[in-house]
Amino acid sequence: MTGSEATDLTRLSATSLARLIQAGEVSAVEVAQAHFDRITKVDDRIHAFLHLDTEGALAAARAVDAKRAAGEALGPLAGVPLALKDVFTMKGVPTTCGSKILEGWRPPYDSTVVTRLRQADLVILGKTNMDEFAMGSSTENSAFGPTRNPWDTDRIPGGSGGGSAASLAAYEAPLAIGSDTGGSIRQPAAVTGTVGVKPTYGGTSRYGLVALASSLDQPGPCARTVLDAALLHEVIAGHDPKDSTSIDQPVPPVVAAAREADVRGLRVGVVKELGGEGYQPGVEQRFRETVDLLAELGAEIVEVSCPHFRYALPAYYLILPSECSSNLARFDAMRYGLRVGDDGTHSAEEVMAMTREAGFGAETKRRIIIGTYALSSGYYEAYYGQAQKVRTLIARDFEAAFERVDVLVSPTTPTTAFRIGERVDDPLAMYKADLCTIPSNLAGNASASFPCGLAPEDGLPVGFQVVAPVLADDRLYRVGAAIEAAYLDRWGHPLLDEAPVL
Amino acid sequence: MPAITREEVAHLARLARIDLTDAELDHLAPQLDVILQAVAEVSKVAADDIPPTSHALALTNVFRPDEPVPGLPVDEALAGAPVVDGEPAVEAQRFRVPRILDEEA
């Protein structure tokens, strides 16, 4: 292949790349190399990647080419490159979670997500940047510097999975993996004009996903097209005995739903509480237009009230720090990661406190301390206990809504991408980026963000959030694919084609 | 009245084993106060008779088949040990750790 054709490979969907590789029109090695070339060209401006596994990726690509040459059957994503969020363990490959405390650590085992990616012959290019331990909405909390939004490099790519989303929007990878605790897949997808899906809690395995808040964390697919996301969803989803919260039931028919792209007769509920004050006019405009589009496509639109959603943000910022303070206690400087002050005079406890001081960033410290407070005796009932009750009320709001409608919709995030530095020292302003995404994590149902246009006032992407009941993940793809096809028809090109050339 | 004082933040940091500097305490304490005042909003919800939800899916007694699988080999488990003075903190096939008792103990 010539240089210009090799560049073109990075613009193709995962589905198209897999087809070309299967047909022998291009080798998996050429595809991987084209993406590494693209990363070399643009990643100094984007900083989506923390580590590239060039050797491992090329070896995986060679194995796919050998399989094909031997006449073996290839899976639907065989040979397709993928960017992996740096919160998933991958044997022998650095896993930092965006934190100094894990700098240089090479895990001795694969996460289940990685095991399944390998089994499906995907080619893992490297590890993507993220807010430290997945806490943040901008990727500015990474100890290794922020990732930049390919639409405007002065702006944030969302977080915590900003690296994964930016790698897609910058054509550095056609597929990526994220993890979503309060919106970390959906909000970056929204602000980068890409697709991001949070599967039903328990739908994908958390084994080897470094835990932030165990009752909320969920791995999920990120892609540029809805069908690509569905194919990746199918690869990583399904029961895993190594995760006790994994659901032992068949994976919802996500790929079929993405292919059908049919919303006729679907009852779509617009959540009344997720809009109005604090929402950017252009975000609300594109959201409204997309609701109208769904009506044109044959969906039935209903307004739905979820009165307790206004308490989701405060409840989340008690539950998450509580679980986080407990989970991050494992970073004790004894068995892995950083150790500071071990000079023979300090005790283990002193070394632990010195290491955590040096190794954790400001947001991680904030949340650990809030969590320690919320779990301390005397405050437990008023804070953590009460937040858990609010969690029940939010789940009940969803139950009541899903008696009337098949899916709920809202903007994914109240504003388009904000400027780097704008909210970094204002935690509450930063937290509000996840206002619309958090309820789904608290209830454990399925949700996704799909591109729905550019806000007229700033020309930046807007995300359309869809939420479906537990194990009805296929409905997300049905809606997302219908929107995608209709807008492709209307605009004549995918939204990402409007992003500036890097 | 602040929800949390500088002294309380210092105490919580000690409990959480984070050796915060004075400058960090000055910076973080007011931020934590703002956050706690905001999250205290949950107390406005009348929820006395509402059961708590700790987990999205109510699963109990989850077992997997009791089949032996190989554990992590010792050298692989120790390979990630913290590095002290350029050497992994490993001794006699174990993690080497600082003394665990304080002088006064």
Image (cartoon, grey):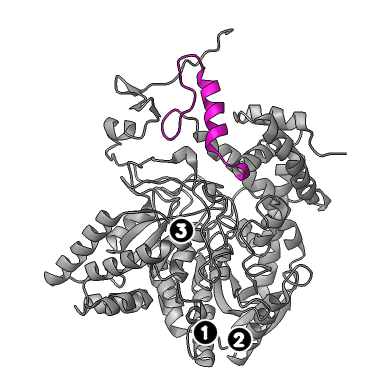
Tell me which chain the residue with mark 3 is part of. Answer: A
Label 2 to label 3: alpha-carbon separation: 36 Å
Q: Amino acid at mark 2?
A: Leu
Quarter of the image where the C terminus of chain A is located: bottom left
Label 1 to label 2: alpha-carbon separation: 8 Å
- The percent coordinates of residue A416 (x first, y second) are 64, 70
Tell me which chain the residue with mark 1 is part of. Answer: A
User: Which residue position holds label 3?
Assistant: A47
Between A20 and B64, the residue placed more toward the observer is A20
User: Which residue position holds label 1?
Assistant: A482
* Outermost residue to the top: B104
Is residue A253 something that shows in the picture? no
Q: Is residue A378 above or below residue A257?
A: above
- The question of residue A361 being in magenta is answered with yes
User: Which residue position holds label 2?
Assistant: A294
Query: Measuring 46% from the left and 67% from the top, which residue is drawn there?
Result: A222
Q: Amino acid at mark 3?
A: His
